[in-house]
Image: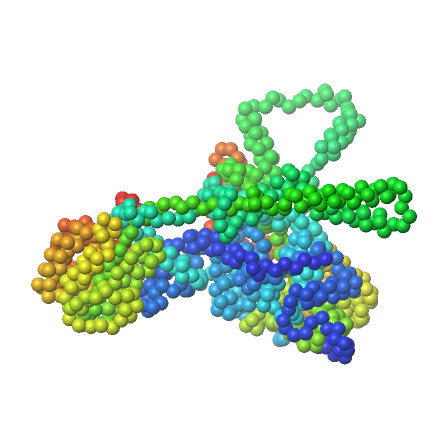
Amino acid sequence: MMIGSLEATHPLQPGGRLLFDGAEWDFQTVHRVYDAVEAIAREELGLDVYPNQIEIISAEQMLDAYSSVGMPLMYAHWSYGKHFARDEALYRKGYTALAYEIVINSNPCISYCMEENTMAMQTLVIAHAAFGHNHFFKNNYLFQQWTDAAGILDYLDFAKRYVASCEERYGVEAVERTLDAAHALMGQGIFRYPRARKLSLADYERLRRERLERDEQDYRDLWRTVPSAPPAREQDVADDDARERKRNLRLPEENLLYFLEKNSPKLRTWQRELLRIVRNVAQYFYPQRQTKVMNEGCATFVHYTIVNRLYDKGLISEGALLEILHSHANVVAQFDYNDPRFSGFNPYALGFAMMQDIKRICVEPTDEDRVWFPDIAGRQDWAAVLRDVWANYRDESFIRQFLSPRLIRQFRMFALSDSATDPKVHVEAIHDDEGYRTVRSKLADSYDVANNEPDIQVVGADTLGDRPLVLRHTLRNGVGLSDAGKEATLRHIRRLWGYEVRLEETTG
Amino acid sequence: MAQFVDRRLNPRDKSLGNRQRFLRRIRSEVKRAVDKAVAERAIADVTKGGSVSIPSDGIDEPQFHLSRELGEREFVLPGNKEFVAGDTIDKPKGKAGGGGAGRDGSGSGRGEDPFSFALTEAEFLDILFEDLELPDLVKTSLKDSKAKEFRRAGYTNDGVTPNLAVLRTMRVSMGRRIALRRPSKSEIEALEQELETLRARPGAGVVERQRIVHLAREIERLKRRQRAIPFIDPIDVRYSRFTPVLVPRAKAVMFCLMDVSASMGEREKELAKRFFILLHLFLKRKYERVDIVFIRHTDEAAEVDEQEFFYGRETGGTVVSSALKEMLAIREARYPVGEWNVYCAQASDGDNSGSDSRECVALLTQTILPLVQYYAYIEIADEGSPLDGGGKELWRAYAGLKETTPGFAMARVAGRSDIYPVFRKLFAKQPNKGAVS
């Protein structure tokens, strides 16, 4: 695929239109390259991005950024120190290289570029992060729905200062205990569905009036003659109270952190605020977890297309193009399942291949494509199709919709099923006519976050009496919780709730 | 529109705070690892920071995860070369399945591997000397308390140029300029601009001409005023003010006495040096003003410098009292008792002639012990000999002192691993005595 573009060798324009020559970079050159990249991104790909802020940082600062989940600021917690220690040790020993860039979903969109990068690499990084990721952040529905790009840095700044002030007032250890417990529940601290918006006072008033009118219209004098219920006994009143309290808790609730923040009988105000901070951070990252393939695919497709266009226009040299394609090829390498380096599907490889494939289906469809993708096959405006894909899908739906038989063949995918009771793994489908749909749907399933995370909800709680809290884990396909960390996490929940916590498992 | 920001000069170590929190959390494990490192390393490397490994239990971040073993799972893999639908494959032994698409945990420190990371030299020493203190550091010389330290104390009207407080000066100057209504440059420029345009316009009427005359006068007036009221007047200038503060200071001198006679083999010398290296580091780190005097002795004693003390090669007979006398002489000459806290640490293999030992004890009881705050003696015992009983000539001679004198401590070491515990024992912080530092 990549060699194809190399064949279109253009003689270099005389008079040196090259944007840069050699490996060294400086700010003027980076500026020029940025402008050239921007022209292609906006005019040819039609990308719509947040304003960019590109920051040049050193390797050490990159390590810093790594350890605070890639954010430029973060509240203080020992676990970030731990990650820093680990990353640093690995980096110093040469086991891992650092990323060329980190990009933050914020407005303006901040991308970090390492100072060690060559000019060619900076070009790649600008196209990849400042345009690819940036466009995706700004346009994908999940990010629009769940994250507030303009506010995140201010919020983190607030969080950092709030945590620091709590540490000052209540002691580092007390804050740490609360944060530890909250971190353990980060996976269960997310709203997976947007909740109903709170009614404005005007709406509420309108609804009330409508209800009143309906009552008047439906009025039947006859109902008055029906004998009413006997007066309630004391026992019933107590039961009613308990039911009322329970109703007020709005169970079941899947966001454990939210539930504890609002209802824990034991937490103090500042601890509730800490829980809120942790769950807001978790929520901010929720879209990223659902769009790894698309996000990286989008960025990789964008940098690949832009860099090739730069070369076609005679703006970068063959050497620079080769350097970029070399690291591009490393990034999109997909190892076979039996390769020692295999660790699942590479989101870069899969996303990039699928997007290239969509472009191909738009431009030169085969008969097979016309059957499978009648909507897009032969539509020449591939850029518009891709923009629509980037805006409206997440990994799961993207794969379910756009994984073509051709790619299934190319990756030689096969679907397996594995049961704990069976000593053998069964091959369900391979890359043949009978198998395409099964493979595609199973692969899509495996990208569904709901399948990969335990479904744990609060189903019972009482804020009075002996205050039990009941959690229910609904098993999917009999997959239970792993023992590692289960008890420890429950202990953290007990700490936050303050009273007995029970976890029950049911098959859904 | 893009902003380019060069962050390379921003302060590094943004995660230093997190790192310290992390270290605090794993303090006890790190401590164990540091102790081990001190015992195992070569003498020159004792203090270099470096890699430590700790078990990952205490730093787990638990979360709910789905099990990989239970229930039924379906997944898709790439790279099929041999299978067709309906085939069965034996499960690989050890780990199940192979997992779906890249769900290989989140790298949150699970697993049994020990967690390994590097300590810096400062962190290493911090942990090494935690809770150690020179005992009875009390004498505060009044004479020397005149040690001055300069502290900031607001602003002053006069001073030397290096102390010029630019921001404050500009603030005062601006206040004065506003109060005196000094015309600003832009104000004059605006008028000049207007004058220019009016003059450039041909065929000016009466109004315009009047305006031109008025403007010229106005500009003239403003410029005069501007000259009369300077931008920065000498009365605006402020300087940062520093006041000397007297800080009380405890002065201490540590005498390090080491036997390097022929009876001390390589092993004994190495152990003794190891002890003194720790002591030296400890003092250098904890106390700004501790004088250290190195005395080594064979049958005669000499004051040597640090390098010579630790790395020199000298050998000969043994007369322990020579070192004690040398120490007394130096103390007499340089460290008057009224001002100095005196400490003494002595290391020897315990071989000495009986008569000299008696002389040592006499010296100690009559002259030295009344002078010093603390006297520590370590005996380098033979390998594998019991540490509680026995002891050689000098040990037996000193044994009586231990009972009678509170400021005297002695211990025996037989191997590398004993050094650090003994060192800690001798210099452990004593909770009931308020130390002055």
Residue ID at (39%, 45%): B245
Asked whether the viewer can see residue A67, the reply is: no
B29 lies left or right of B187: left
Determine the residue positioned at 29% across, 47% down. Answer: B143
Quadrant assignment, res A418: bottom right
Q: Taking B48 as reference, is A412 left or right?
A: right
The residue lying toward the viewer, choosing from A504 and B367, is B367
Q: Position of residue B2 (x, y in %)?
A: 70, 58
As rendered, which of A283 and B358 lies closer to the eye? B358
Outermost residue to the top:
A225
Q: How many marks?
A: 0
Q: How is the image coloured?
A: rainbow
State the residue at coordinates (15%, 54%).
B367
B121 or A167: which is nearer to us? B121
**x, y (%) of residue A508?**
60, 50
Figure quadrant of the N terminus of chain A: bottom right
- Residue B253, relative to residue B90: is it above or below? above
Q: Position of residue B31 (x, y in %)?
A: 36, 57
Q: As drawn, is A141 to the left or to the right of B376?
A: right
Q: Is residue A21 above or below residue A373?
A: below
Between B325 and B194, the one lying in front of the other is B194
Q: Is residue A149 above or below residue A28?
A: above
Question: Looking at the image, which residue is at 76% across and 42% down?
Answer: B218
**In the figure, A291 relative to A258: above or below?**
below
Horizontally, residue B396 falls left or right of residue A16, namely left
Q: In x, y percent, where is residue A487?
A: 47, 50
- Residue B7 visible, this angle: yes
